[in-house]
Image (tube, helix red, strand yellow):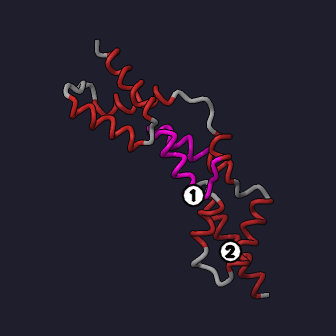
Amino acid sequence: MKILDESKAIRIKIMDFLSRREHSSKEIYQKMSHRVESNEMLINEINKLISDGLISDERFAESYFQSRKRKGFGPLRIKNELAQRGINDSIFFSIQPETDWSYLAFQALEKKINGKKPDDIKAILKLKNFLNYRGFEFQDIDKALSMLDEENR
């Protein structure tokens, strides 16, 4: 009877996490592993919830991808953050629709400079580093800076 109660308690706590937002199976495991006596029981409950469709790494990845994209982050950073949360590359590439990353980098640049065009090399390098930190690829950074130059002509 105690095993059933613990199993039920694990499921309820996981459902509590899932009611707030999507989680990857790795995140659930990390959050719960220190709270339970039996990791085997935890893994069993996670697997049951996956088979019931309540935990979905694909659904989590899609939600996370869209959220980070809206906040102005690039593909390299998003892919890395998803990998840290247990999402493999194949899921990342399957959820990534055709995206104009250059334009998103340009939008992040516009927000960053707030109408003040960079005038010296040091300021431009700083902006390139900013976009690189945000996870944009170098060709997208160069295109975004070109778009910024065209807009300010």
* Mark drawn on residue 10: 2
Q: Does the magenta stretch include residue 85?
A: yes
Residue at (69%, 74%) from the top-left corner?
42
Q: Is residue 23 above or below residue 100?
A: below
Q: Which class describes the residues within 10 Å of circle 2: few (<14), some (14-19), or many (20+)? A: some
Residue at (75%, 60%) from the top-left corner?
50
**Image location of residue 58, percent across then percent down:** 68, 49
Left or right, residue 107 beside residue 31: left
What's drawn in magenta, residue-wise? 62-89
Kindly give the residue lying farthest to the top in the view shown: 153
* Mark drawn on residue 85: 1
User: Which is nearer the eye, 38 or 126?
Assistant: 126
Placement of the N terminus among the 4 image quadrants: bottom right
Residue at (41%, 42%) from the top-left corner?
134
**Image location of residue 59, percent across then percent down:** 67, 48
Three-letter residue code for mark 1? Arg
Residue at (61%, 58%) from the top-left corner?
86
Left or right, residue 15 beside residue 73: right
Q: Is residue 36 magenta?
A: no
Q: What element carries label 2?
A: helix
